[in-house]
Image (cartoon, coloured by chain):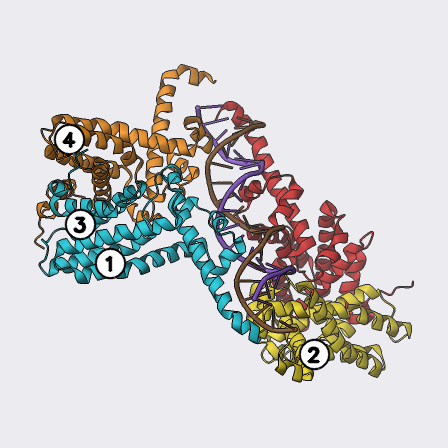
Chain colours: A cyan, B orange, C red, D yellow, E brown, F purple
DNA sequence: AATGAATGAGAATTCATTCAT
DNA sequence: AATGAATGAATTCTCATTCAT
């Protein structure tokens, strides 16, 4: 490698990272819009301006980007989630923190690509469950388990609870993103209230 | 048309209906197992013993069966749901009735094909939302609206509420189906309790 | 199935068989011209006038046609070969019979498609070994073994002998096909003579 | 150009040659293992430690290395072959010498990379004819012609003879390489015996 | 020269849909 | 109507070759 090349290695490496990330971002959008099956590799790379070949330089298969997407989302969200877990003094504070954190996370994500959310409902009315959510499921479940273990929350059916909470967060989160502007705090209040105290705990609207 | 066919015009008509239903049932199973994209028309007709050509005699496209499936599920479930609505004296009774009815409905549906639920998670870990649920969404939303209108429930964000309730019912329902035997009443108690009174309202487990 | 359909079943079945054979024949030609790797499925079906899809109605993969080709060639040649084996009174008569039969076989095959032999050397100078020959290899080897067992031929290195004989038959056979007209008997005499008595046993040419 | 490079112009030239040869050697191995079509340029350069780009500095295309390989093999083998021709007093001695030389040549070549010969049959059961052999064909043919011209061998069909001899040498040679250890002399005796005197001239085995 | 990322034509295969029988 | 072979667009992935650094 020549001296010049050595000096430029940084720039090269930078481009590679940027491309890798660009593909990941495009994949997130496209999978989000069309679902795993319907989305094609061409759909993904079209958004990056790269070539089909380039895609396969970065990911070995369509399946691999999908997995990477889950890893990526989970890797970035998990620490946030865990921080809430550590901060929490009781179940209520954990739940409120976790859900708010999640909604803020997806709003931030959404900003990056957003705009074409219109297509969403239209294109894939039957595909859901983001890779991120899937990856986080176990995290949530065991956080709940731990909280109950410590007597900070009533002992209830853990699988149902985790399932229900994730379902609420996922779908209300998605609903929130459709609003302009999306109100993470409001949505979090709604979900937390519902889970903790049921209908009675949910914020009233005056309208 | 052969002589025999002419003589059996009535039976013919019957067969037509039976075939139409057979395809619909097969489609429900197959879409359930594989998801819309992964499922093929051949997968569907294979279960009916009919031919590919016959499929297109009854439905114009793969998409159309899917839509018909939603209609079918909704058509059969909607009256049940509405009966609960009429029976209900307050929001609580409506909710409990509706959810219990839904869970019993899907348990019954499940019996028909079931068994290969194992494939499910494996085959399409990221595709959900049964056609039935989708079709019922508006129904539920307007039932909630009506209930609130009548002052039987606190005024809250309706879209969030409908979304959350459907999310819970869908996912906890799915979770319930994995258990052996599936306990519709128990799951309904869980969901109703959660929605009405939050965590505190959820049945305890002793374990 | 209607009466008409029943009556036509024969014609249908006939077409299917014809297509299957057409694909096989096209595959033989194309693999012969281009070699397995270079030949594409489209190359094959282009010769049949069918569509890509039709190819996959008859064979599950490119690999499968290749295998079928071997089976086909072997299935048709093996009985001929075996007949020679039974007819033979000594090694010499077996060898002469077998080689002559082989040459006549490939001349006959060649007639069917022929013509584009010109491409051959040009297109794939480095790919050889027809599927047929490969399938027949073991047959030949065990025939040799049997003959030696019975003391009808000297005991020599069997693998070398089978290899050498097949090599000669294959390549001289190919050479013969290039000539116009191909002289199966002459080529067979050459090979038999060479194998049995060496150079001295080979027919002289006057030129 | 860096200072160091300027100082080492001579070494540079040397490196160029070494790289060229390294690529050629790698190509021989890889083509041998996988066949021309299956082998990729990356397969080749991977063995050299060079980069894809470097490959194209030395050879304009995959096809060109293949041709160069033939040239190379031929260039190295031809003198050996010709030496045998000059040494020979009659056809017998020429043939024995040539074949033995060829077998020793390929055994030596094989030593260089060898080991993974197992893959061979597995990877490309239907592709053969080393570039070397192809390049030598004419050489052999004209040597035979010359020998016959001089009355040292009976006049026979020259094309058939050259074809047959090369076929035998190629395939028995390949067979020999599979044995451990490969016995060049034994295989040469076999082939020479067969070609000169036929079956009767082939070494007996006792077993 | 060397490097290795980028390119894009092309390969095998699938599958919704059509259509002759 | 029923049948199932035929169609061909579309999909994933590969790989020779080019090109910016």
Residue D126 location, quadrant:
bottom right
Label 4 vs label 2, nearer the camera: 4
Q: Position of residue B32 (x, y in %)?
A: 32, 41
Picture quarter with the C terminus of chain A = top left
Q: Nearer the viewer, residue C60 or D202?
A: C60
Instruction: Give the class, few, some or many, for how many residues have Cα within 10 Å of label 4's Cα (few <14, many ≥20).
Output: some
**Discs 1 and 4 share one subunit:** no
**Discs 2 and 1 share one subunit:** no
Picture quarter with the N terminus of chain A = bottom right
Judging by the rendered image, the residue that carries numbered circle 3 is A161
Q: Secondary structure at mark 4?
A: helix
The reply to whether the C-beta atoms of the residues labelled 3 and 2 are less than 8 Å apart is no
In space, the residues marked 4 and 3 are separated at their CA atoms by 26 Å
Label 2 vs label 1, nearer the camera: 1
Label 3 vs label 1, nearer the camera: 1
Q: Is residue C127 above or below residue B192?
A: below
Chain under numbered label 3: A
Judging by the rendered image, the residue that carries numbered circle 2 is D105
The reply to whether the C-beta atoms of the residues labelled 4 and 2 are less than 8 Å apart is no
Q: Position of residue D4 (x, y in %)?
A: 62, 83
Instruction: Give the class, few, some or many, for how many residues have Cα within 10 Å of label 3's Cα (few <14, many ≥20).
Output: many
Q: Position of residue D35 (x, y in %)?
A: 62, 64
Q: Residue at x 57, y 40 (%)?
A: C54
**Discs 3 and 2 share one subunit:** no
Judging by the rendered image, the residue that carries numbered circle 4 is B148
In space, the residues marked 2 and 1 are separated at their CA atoms by 68 Å
**Discs 4 and 3 share one subunit:** no
In space, the residues marked 3 and 2 are separated at their CA atoms by 75 Å
In space, the residues marked 4 and 2 are separated at their CA atoms by 94 Å
Give me the disc on residue A81. Answer: 1
């Amino acid at each position: 490698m020549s001296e010049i090349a050595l000096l430029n290695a940084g720039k090269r490496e930078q481009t590679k990272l940027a491309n890798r990330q660009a593909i990941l971002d495009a994949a997130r959008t496209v999978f989000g819009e069309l679902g795993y099956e319907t989305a094609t590799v061409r759909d993904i790379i079209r958004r990056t301006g790269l070539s089909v070949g380039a895609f396969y330089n970065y990911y070995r298969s369509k399946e691999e980007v999908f997995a990477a997407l889950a890893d990526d989302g989970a890797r970035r969200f998990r620490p946030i989630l865990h921080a809430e877990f550590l901060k929490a003094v009781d179940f209520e504070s954990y739940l409120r923190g976790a859900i708010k954190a999640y909604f803020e996370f997806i709003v931030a994500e959404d900003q990056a690509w957003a705009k074409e959310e219109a297509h969403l409902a239209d294109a894939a009315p039957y595909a859901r469950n983001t890779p991120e959510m899937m990856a986080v499921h176990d995290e949530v479940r065991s956080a709940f388990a731990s909280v109950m273990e410590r007597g900070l929350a009533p002992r209830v059916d853990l699988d149902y609870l985790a399932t229900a909470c994730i379902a609420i967060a996922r779908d209300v989160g998605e609903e929130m993103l459709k609003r302009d502007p999306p109100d993470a705090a409001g949505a979090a209040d709604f979900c937390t209230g519902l889970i903790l105290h049921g209908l009675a705990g949910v914020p009233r609207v005056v309208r």
